[in-house]
Image: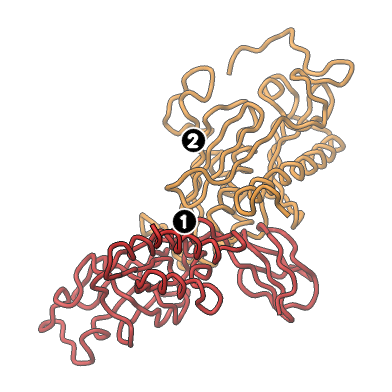
Amino acid sequence: MGGRDATMVLLDENGIRCDGRKIDEPRKIMIRAGGLKNADGSAYIEFGDNKILVGVFGPRDVHPKHMSNTDTGILRVRYHMEPFSVDERKRPAPSRREIEISKVIKEALEPAVMLEKFPRTAVDVFIEVLQADGGTRCAALSAASVALADAGIPMRDMVAAIASGKVADTIILDVNNEEDQAGQADMPVGYMPNLKKITLLQLDGVLTSEEYKKCVTVGVEGCKLVYEIQKQALNDKYFGKKGD
Amino acid sequence: MVDKRKYVIPGDVITTGPFRPEQNVMLVGEKIIATAVGISEIYDDSVKVIPLTGKYIPKIDDLVIAKVNSHTSLSWELDINSCYVGFLPAQDVFGRDFSAHADELATKLKTGDLVAARIANFDRTRDPLVTISDRDLGKIDSGILIAISPSKVPRLIGKRGSMIQMIEQATNAAVTIGQNGWVVVSCDTPEGLLKAKIAIEMVNEKAHVANLTDQVKEMLDKKSES
């Protein structure tokens, strides 16, 4: 995704990152619940320069029928990047990476969604990445969780997600595209803030065990910030601007 | 009595203590946690959340408005605006002496017909069984169908039916409300029909507003002057 700039400084001596953020500062996050009329629930997220739209259908009939489960409902997630979401046109067919992220997001949402209440049905989550700038899986997971709540699907908790990582030997919060390309490690974390449970944890890079622990802690703290924004998005839609 | 109401989203802790969890809440240790976006209500010994969004989930004894989807030689399949399809056996309409050779189901109910039905039986393992053999149930011959959000049905009915009675009196319309969010309105005059339709849509859009009954009343009065 673009050539690497060899002269770029990822972290300067004052602790300021390449896009002007401090080490524990996330990008600007905006979430809006609703917005799509034909979907049962929807959400739109702007996570720095990431722009992602999520639509949720269900619970509804399962097609093909053989996929249905008589004990529980099933969750299906499609993560898809638009051809125009990156610098160079991306072929619209699902790539290996998109299939992986679909699976990872599905498994991160499953502990939260109470599918056992709807046997023989499916809940479909469609994620469209309109513009990508690193950290789309976390942004998509956060938005998908808001969209599921908007659709009225019973959930144990919201799932908030953000990535932490290691750049210039320092643990940072919210890895952007440049830091992802040139940095030392990238760790997406999905977290249920009220139940205090981690639902997504991946790691790309090498960390010592101390750094690993720090990275998880930083990620979890970041998720709590994202959660507040998710909460505000739902409050804005359902209870007017004031919230409670 | 209702203690205190609170706006909640999934995961919010409503209260702690020895309460019975009712709809849309769950018990985790001592904490009672909301599982839906809605308004929480704490009663003497129980807690529940009134959801503000979501699909219709069939409940036994609910009155629903259903649309005939298709039929086999033994039963009809009804669309009840839910994730499950309603199952209406032919015996329910033709009686015990129904015979698959002699009776043709299409003579009674055709695809696309609207019926007022009751959920007779429903559990996790089977599709909801519906019945139309009761007073006030059966095929609906006249009126228009309005779809509202199933979570807003209680608001449309109002406290002890106050909201719906007011709309019916002001417009002279007959309104049948299905718990599944489908509403059938019939009226002798087109003006009344239109007014009732506007009122119902207004309730659907402004369900969260506090003095909605007054607002709807104002709207109904204004329209009748002009």
- For disc 1, the neighbor class at 10 Å (few under 14, some 14 to 19, many from 20) is many
Chain letter for the orange part: A
Q: Which chain does the red colour mark? A: B
Residue at x 79% of width, y 31% of height: A25
Q: Which residue in the structure is indicated by mark 2? A: A80
| Distance between mark 1 and mark 2 Cα atoms | 19 Å
Q: Which image quarter: residue B18?
A: bottom right
Residue A178 vertical placement versus B24 (above, below): above
Q: Choose the circle earlier in sequence order: 1 or 2.
A: 1
Q: Residue at x 74, y 11 (%)?
A: A8
Q: Residues within 10 Å of mark 2 (few under 14, many from 20)?
A: many
Tag 1 subunit: A
Q: Is residue B59 above or below residue A239?
A: below
Q: Nearer the viewer, residue B47 or A1?
A: B47
| Residues tagged by mark 1 and mark 2 found on one chain of the structure | yes
Residue B174 percent location from the top left of the image: 35, 74
Q: Nearer the viewer, mark 1 or mark 2?
A: 1
Name the spot of residue A208 as percent of width and height, x first. 83, 33
Above or below, B108 against B49 in this view is below
Residue B90 rendering spot, x and y as whole percentages: 23, 81
- Residue A179, by quadrant, is top right
Residue pictured at 55% horizontal, 38% vertical: A100
Q: Given the image, on which type of amino acid does mark 2 rest?
A: His
- Residue A222 percent across, percent down from the top left: 77, 40
Rendered residue at 58%/27% (across/down)? A132
